[in-house]
Image (cartoon, rainbow, N blue to C red):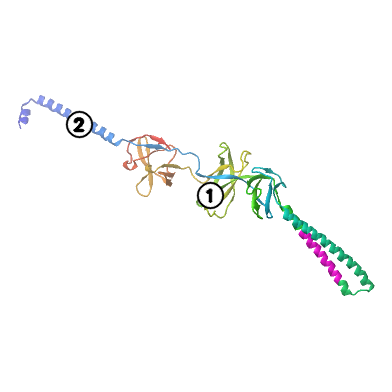
Amino acid sequence: MKLLNFLTKLPKKQLYYGLAAATGLCIIVGILLSENNKTKVMAEDMINVRTLTISITGDKQGYTYSGEVHGRYESQLAFQVNGKIIKRNVELGSIVNAGDVLMQIDAKDIQQTVNSSSAQVASAESQLRLAESNLNRYRQLLKQGAISQSLYDQYVNTYHVAVAGLQQASAQYAQGTNQLDYSLLRSDKPGVVSNITAEMGQVVNTGQTVVTLVQDGEREVEISIPENRIKELHNAGQIKATFWALPHVTVYGKIREMAPIADQNTRTFKVRISLINPPPEIKLGMTAAIQLSDSYAQPTVNIPLAAVYQDGNTPAVWIVTNNVITLQSITTGQFGNGRIEVLSGLKQGDCIVAAGVHKLKEGQKVRIGGDSI
């Protein structure tokens, strides 16, 4: 009340200037307070975030399998007779020609059998000559009427028995000769000895593998494929083979054959990959890595699981553009070890928030920093 009485007693001109000064002072104070609040709001809204920049290469998704170099044609050689090995003429890696003797079995017993068969052939030949002589003589007597027809027929039959006896003895002799020849293990094709499983002094059975011979020609890699990767194998658009001992050599290949039944122990399918024009540096038994690229697969990228924002059924990521974030839906694939595969929704150069995604909101300004993936 006193202030009001005081103001009414002031001259009008002084009162006017006083009110104008007070009003200006209030406006200035209001502007300063507004700017201060605005600065605080901007400082509170603009936060630091860790980001990743997407870098998608043109490589297609693929799988790598380890394998071993084999020959296209491998012969498991074995003796066709039993016996004790008395000679070995080859070593691992020996180059042999067709007809070369690789091993020899002690043929003493076989030789005695051949000698016995030879004696039986000589005896059968003697019996045949005697039967033939008697038959000719009794044929003349039959013409003269000195003997009966029935007696002559007996000598004819004796002759036929002698002929059959000679044939039997000759067959037994031929069989013994073959057995004698089987005591020598020969190479039927030119190639390289890749494995030897018997030594001198060892007694082996008929059909027991003693030498593995790889024929000259094609080279291929044998790998094992799990049953859940059969589809990727058939969809392989490109097959490349690299070698541990030859890091600068890469050879293309093609699928030659695949086992129809899985291995009982490993539950994998054996696959043979033929190498196209392999260089001579590739040796048998080398360790190889077969890379299968899927011709139908799209380029993908793996991002941290912490970068995925999911509010509902659709996963998304925060994309930063000019320090402003927007939500982008993505399609995900396999995940593991803290990362997830993104099949679509991201492109080259996209900058995404890598952590703390559930604390952000659409259109929020951020300060970025981070790496590329």
Q: Residue 307, located in which quarter of the rendered image?
A: top left
Q: How far across and how far down the image is residue 215, in percent?
A: 66, 46
Amino acid under label 2?
Gly
In the rendered structure, does residue 168 fall within the stretch colored magenta?
yes
Q: Residue 68, located in which quarter of the rendered image?
A: top right
Q: Is residue 351 left or right of residue 58?
A: left
Q: How far across and how far down the image is residue 311, in percent?
A: 34, 47
| Few, some or many residues within 10 Å of mark 2 (<14, 14–19, 20+) | few
Residue linked to disc 2: 30
Residue beneath the point at 43% across and 44% down: 341
Circle 2 — which element? helix
Report the front residue among 127 and 174: 127
- The total number of labels drawn is 2
Residue linked to disc 1: 225
Magenta-highlighted residues: 154-172
Residue beneath the point at 14% across and 28% down: 22
Q: How far across and how far down the image is residue 108, in percent?
A: 73, 53
For the N terminus, the quadrant is top left
Between discs 2 and 1, the one toward the N terminus: 2
Q: How far across and how far down the image is residue 190, in percent?
A: 69, 45
Amino acid under label 1?
Ile
Residue beneath the point at 86% across and 69% down: 156
For the C terminus, the quadrant is top left
Report the front residue among 82 and 347: 82
**Residue 216 seen from this side:** no
**Discs 2, 1 touching: Cβ within 8 Å:** no
User: Is residue 151 placed above or below 77 in the rendered structure?
Assistant: below
Circle 1 — which element? strand
**Residue 52 seen from this side:** yes
